[in-house]
């Protein structure tokens, strides 16, 4: 922007002060580049953390002071829901704004099958993604933490900076193989959550302030699954928890599904370990301590933003890929440890917190229904980009973050986990099962918030079921992609635990797909 020139300099100026003043006026005529005022975006995605385990969501047993403070400084959403109960599908949805039955990632991508995939296979490369879109519009982009969407190498067209570990899921928090941009090394003697926090702080300290940044910190904690979280933990917070009683962790009988699975082959001892975790105080202390480890990391990131003068112009969003059970319904672990999946509230209701000083009012609590497919359009909108994501059911709630009313926001969210599809409204949760895989379920969330009584088949609720079924079918008829719609004989990306189920339904020729697809490109960003 050019400033007006009010005087010219003469080398013969007779008054020193006048000469200096005239020099400053001339300097102001030099074109200067306008400061980029678009917000930086720090997106923190943690692994398997349900909202109900955090202090800000009412848990009295687990210490999460930094996350709680972040909520106090912004807005906390009480009705944010994962689209699926496993990590790879939900991360694909966060990055594309699409449903699992659209992008095709419909189960966790099994590390044991990594050798069968192409060396540069990225499960969602053919779609518009959040980092690609922001990078094409001038953002510096970085991912630090868990990836789990294909081979652990950076998609170069998306990220300028990349640090992850060599597997998709967490086998151990210690001694991981690290891919640090173009360098690989063994991380020894450091908890992976601490390591990813340190790398993120290092990134923020080195930030050049020339362009806004989009930084994804994708912690591989708290995790909350066996064997990592079975029994005593190896971290600095475990000692603070090991003698606590944990009244917020249910004590009850092990779920019948787990007991049934124990009667079959369990070579990796998943179900045996789930049974061992149940009602075990050491496991509870482990889980609590890993959540506090994540909270420590969040505190370090927020401090780095303050120390580097970035806090005021950074939108911070904190969320989880999905939740886990920690005793509810006699279950520990993921929703897919039963088939078809059980999409209980504990596992599907996730934390969602946003802070942006001067834009998002402090201390807000919102009960707006948010699906994970809504996050990408919202972040693009907050960055100033009004962009239609092809075929996405997602909508931007940026105006809500800024304090304005939303026009005709939906009164429900939808979930999409292979043979189980669900709709959650203000009053009901309805789960529909793919024909031949299980029974449907209906819960009255106002009268039965713990989901203890399945009302499906009760004649008093026949009209409710009919209407919810109509809405659910209409939603998926509108948005699902026939290529990846398991309810229409479609396939899945990469891998699924249920291959034999789909072969029995659609024939022996049915197989998961890991072909390399053409990368998405936009011609006029």
Image: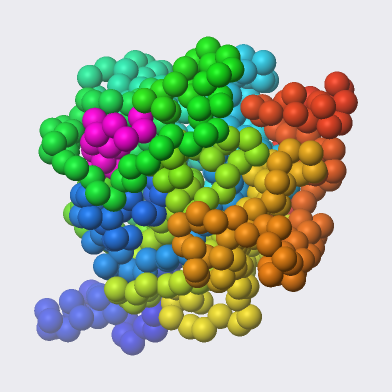
449 drawn magenta? no
Question: Which residue of the protein is positioned furthest toward the front in this rendering?
Answer: 459
Colouring scheme, one of rainbow, by chain, secondary structure, one colour: rainbow
Residue 178 against residue 473 in the figure, above or below: above
Q: Which residues are magenta?
A: 277-292
On the image, which quarter does residue 458 sit in?
A: bottom right
What residue appears at the point 58 percent right and 60 percent down from the top-left corner? 443
Quarter holding the N terminus?
bottom left
Q: Nearer the viewer, residue 459 or 278?
A: 459
On the image, which quarter does residue 341 sit in?
A: top right
Q: Nearer the viewer, residue 446 or 349?
A: 446
290 drawn magenta? yes
What residue appears at the point 17 percent right and 84 percent down from the top-left corner? 18
What residue appears at the point 30 percent right and 64 percent down from the top-left corner? 71
Main secondary structure found in the magenta portion = helix
Q: Nearer the viewer, residue 313 or 439?
A: 439
Measured from the top left, where is residue 459 in percent x and y?
72, 66
Q: Is residue 315 visible?
A: no
What residue appears at the point 64 percent right and 44 percent down from the top-left corner? 417
Measured from the top left, where is residue 379 in percent x and y?
51, 61
Quarter holding the C terminus?
bottom right
Measured from the top left, where is residue 60 in percent x and y?
23, 55
Residue 272 as seen in the image, left or right of residue 363: right
Question: Which residue of the protein is positioned furthest toward the bottom in this rendering?
Answer: 6
Q: Is residue 291 visible?
A: yes
Residue 300 as seen in the image, left or right of residue 132: left
Measured from the top left, where is residue 196 in percent x and y?
32, 35
């Amino acid at each position: 922007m050019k400033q007006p020139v009010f005087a010219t300099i003469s080398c013969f100026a007779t008054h020193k002060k006048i000469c200096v003043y005239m020099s400053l006026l001339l300097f102001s005529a030099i074109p200067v580049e306008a400061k980029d005022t678009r917000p930086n975006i720090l997106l923190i995605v943690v692994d398997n953390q349900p909202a109900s385990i955090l202090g800000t969501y009412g848990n009295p047993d687990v210490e999460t002071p930094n996350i709680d403070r972040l909520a106090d400084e912004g807005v906390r959403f009480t009705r944010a829901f994962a689209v699926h109960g496993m990590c790879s599908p939900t991360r694909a949805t966060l990055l594309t704004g699409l449903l699992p039955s659209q992008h095709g990632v419909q189960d966790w991508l099994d590390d044991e099958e990594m050798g069968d995939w192409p060396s540069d296979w990225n499960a969602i490369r053919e779609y518009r993604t959040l980092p690609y879109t922001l990078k094409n519009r001038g953002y510096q982009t970085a991912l630090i933490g868990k990836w789990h969407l294909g081979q652990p190498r950076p998609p170069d067209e998306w990220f300028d900076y990349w640090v992850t570990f060599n597997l998709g899921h967490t086998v151990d928090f210690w001694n991981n193989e690290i891919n640090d941009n173009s360098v690989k090394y063994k991380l020894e003697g450091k908890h992976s959550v601490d390591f990813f926090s340190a790398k993120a702080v290092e990134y923020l300290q080195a930030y050049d302030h020339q362009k806004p940044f989009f930084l994804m910190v994708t912690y591989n904690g708290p995790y909350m699954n066996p064997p990592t979280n079975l029994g005593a933990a190896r971290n600095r917070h475990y000692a603070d928890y090991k003698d606590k009683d944990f009244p917020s962790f249910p004590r009850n009988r092990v779920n019948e599904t787990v007991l049934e699975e124990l009667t079959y082959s369990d070579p990796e001892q998943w179900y045996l370990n789930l049974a061992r975790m149940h009602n075990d105080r050491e496991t509870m202390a482990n889980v609590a301590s890993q959540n506090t480890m994540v909270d420590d990391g969040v505190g370090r990131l927020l401090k780095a933003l303050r120390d580097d003068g970035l806090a005021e112009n950074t939108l911070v969003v904190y969320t989880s890929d999905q939740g886990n059970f920690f005793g509810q319904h006699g279950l520990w672990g993921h929703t897919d440890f039963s088939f078809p999946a059980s999409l209980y509230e504990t596992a599907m209701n996730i934390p969602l917190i946003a802070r942006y000083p001067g834009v998002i009012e402090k201390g807000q609590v919102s009960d707006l229904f948010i699906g994970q497919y809504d996050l990408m359009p919202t972040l693009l909108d907050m960055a100033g980009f009004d962009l239609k994501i092809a075929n996405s059911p997602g909508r931007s709630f940026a105006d809500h973050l800024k304090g304005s009313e939303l026009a005709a926001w939906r009164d429900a969210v939808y979930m999409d986990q292979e043979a189980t599809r669900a709709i959650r409204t203000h009053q009901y949760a309805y789960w529909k099962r793919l024909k031949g895989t299980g029974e449907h379920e209906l819960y009255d969330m106002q009268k039965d918030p713990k989901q203890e009584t399945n009302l499906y088949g009760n004649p008093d609720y026949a009209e409710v079921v009919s209407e919810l079924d109509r809405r659910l079918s209409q939603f998926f008829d509108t948005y699902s992609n026939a290529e990846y719609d398991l309810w229409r004989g479609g396939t899945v990306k990469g891998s699924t635990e249920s291959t034999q189920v789909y072969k029995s339904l659609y024939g022996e020729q049915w197989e998961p797909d890991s072909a390399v697809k053409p990368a998405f490109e936009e011609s006029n960003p």
